[in-house]
Image: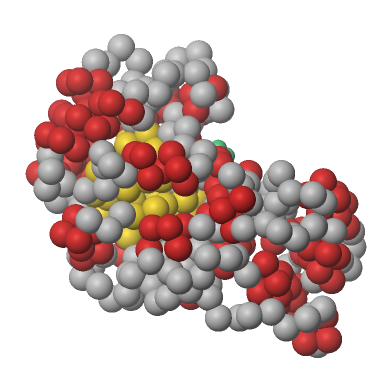
Amino acid sequence: MRIRALLPCAGKLAFSPALRYERGMTTSHFYAEALQTGRPILAVAPMIDWTDRHCRYFHRQISRNALLYTEMVVADAIIHGPRERLLSFDQAEHPVALQLGGSDPDKLTKAVEIAAPYGYDEINLNVGCPSDRVQSGTFGACLMLTPDVVAGCIRAMKAVSSVPVTVKCRIGVDEQEPEQALPDLLDRVLDAGADAIWIHARKAWLKGLSPKENREIPPLDYDIVYRTKQARPDVFIGINGGIQTLDQAAEHLRHVDGVMIGRAAYQNAGVLADVDHRFFGASDTEADWDGLRDRMMIYAARHIDNGGRLQQVARHMVGLFTGLPGARRYRQILSTEAVKAGAGPEVIAAAFAAVDFSGVAAEAVGA
Ligand SMILES: Cc1cc2nc3c(=O)[nH]c(=O)nc-3n(C[C@H](O)[C@H](O)[C@H](O)COP(=O)(O)O)c2cc1C
C-alpha cells in the first residue's frame, strides 16, 4: 500500500523528549528512580478488551512518557494459548507493562519466563479485578483475602524477572477492614520483593456486583491511599480510581508517587495530550494532531497490509476529541466507515478533517 499517497499533509513527526525509561533497566530501576527524584509515573490502567496493542500504540502517539499497561493476561493462557498473539507488541509502545492474572506461583513463573523475550518493562500482578471467576479464587480481587498466596506469587515472579514486579490491588474486599487488609497485603508483598503498588482506591464487593458496578458503586477512599504512602515513604505507591483530569492527577501527586488513569484515558484519550509537558518537562505545549493522524494512518496501513482490519485500530480512537466542534462527526466517521469491508487509513484522514482545531490548546482537549 502506498502510504505516502494517503497522507493529506506531512505533519511534524518528531514528538517530545526521550523516554525516561530505558530498555534493559534492571529490576526496580525506574520505580526507584521515581522515588529518588520525585518524578511521578503517570499510567494508563490495564483494561480488558480496551488496552490491546492497537490502543497502546495510539496512546503512545499522544504521550511519550505515560506508562502503558496491557490487558490482564491469564498465566494459563500464556502457557497454553496463542503466545505470539497475546504477548507481541510494537517496540514503539515502550514503556509497557504486562499485567498477569493468576495465583499459582509455578504458572506465574512460567508465564514470566515465556514473556521475558518480548521485552516488557514491568510485570504486574492483578489483585484487584473482580471477575466472573472470582468464586474459583484463581485471580484478581479475591486474592486480597489470601495475602500469603499473593506474596508467594510475587516472590516466585521476582526470582525469574529482570524487570520490576508490581501489584495492582484494591483497598479490600467485602467485609474486610481496609485499615487492616491493605497494610497486611502490602507488608507481605513488599517483603516478597514487590517493586511498586498501584491501589484502586475502593473496595471490591465480590458478591452481587458486576465488574462494571464494582468500578462505580463501592465508594472511593483516596485518604487511605495517602495514609498508606505516609506510612511507607520508601515504597512507590500509585493511586487509581475515578481520576478524570490532569488537574486531579496533579492534586493526587501531592500525596502519592504515581497516578493511574483508566476509563477517562480510554474514553477521552485527549486527556493524555498534556501529560508530557505537564509532568515530564516536554517543551511542546501544543499537541501535534496532524502528526498523530499521520502516524495512525501509517500504523493502520501496516496493520491492514499484515491482514488486520482498520476497525481493530480505529475503535480505540473514537473518543479522542470529546468536547471539540466536529467531534460527533469524527466519531460517526470512525464508527461507521471503519467497519466497512476494505476500509483503509483514508477513513482516519476523513475523520480528523471533520474536527475543528482552531484556537484549541492541547490541554483543552479532554479537559
Ligand atoms: C473495560 C475495563 C476493563 C478492565 N480490565 C482490567 C484488567 O484487565 N485488569 C485490572 O487490573 N483492572 C481492569 N480494569 C480496572 C481498571 O484498571 C481501573 O482500575 C478502574 O477502571 C478504575 O480506574 P478509572 O476510574 O480510572 O477507570 C478494567 C476497567 C475497565 C473499564
Image quadrant holding the C terminus, namely top right
**Measuring 70% from the left and 51% from the top, which residue is drawn there?**
321
Foreground: 72 or 329? 329
Image quadrant holding the N terminus, namely bottom right
Q: Residue furthest front?
A: 359
Name the quadrant containing residue 206. top left
- Residue 146 in view, yes or no: no
**Measuring 59% from the left and 58% from the top, which residue is drawn there?**
362
**Measuring 58% from the left and 65% from the top, which residue is drawn there?**
286
Number of numbered callouts drawn = 0
Left/right of residue 269 with respect to residue 24 in the rendered view: right
Left/right of residue 296 with respect to residue 181 in the rendered view: right
> How far across and down, in percent of the image, does residue 315 sit?
72, 53
Name the quadrant containing residue 96. bottom left
> How far across and down, in percent of the image, does residue 347 sit?
84, 65
- The answer to whether 210 is drawn above or below residue 121 in the figure is above
> How far across and down, in percent of the image, does residue 107 sit?
32, 51
Foreground: 270 or 136? 270
- The answer to whether 127 is drawn above or below residue 107 in the figure is above
Foreground: 328 or 44? 328
> How far across and down, in percent of the image, does residue 350 sit?
86, 65
- The answer to whether 206 is drawn above or below residue 148 in the figure is above
- Residue 143 in view, yes or no: yes
Q: Colour mode?
A: secondary structure
- The answer to whether 281 is drawn above or below residue 1 in the figure is above
**Measuring 32% from the left and 60% from the top, which residue is drawn there?**
122
Name the quadrant containing residue 304. bottom right
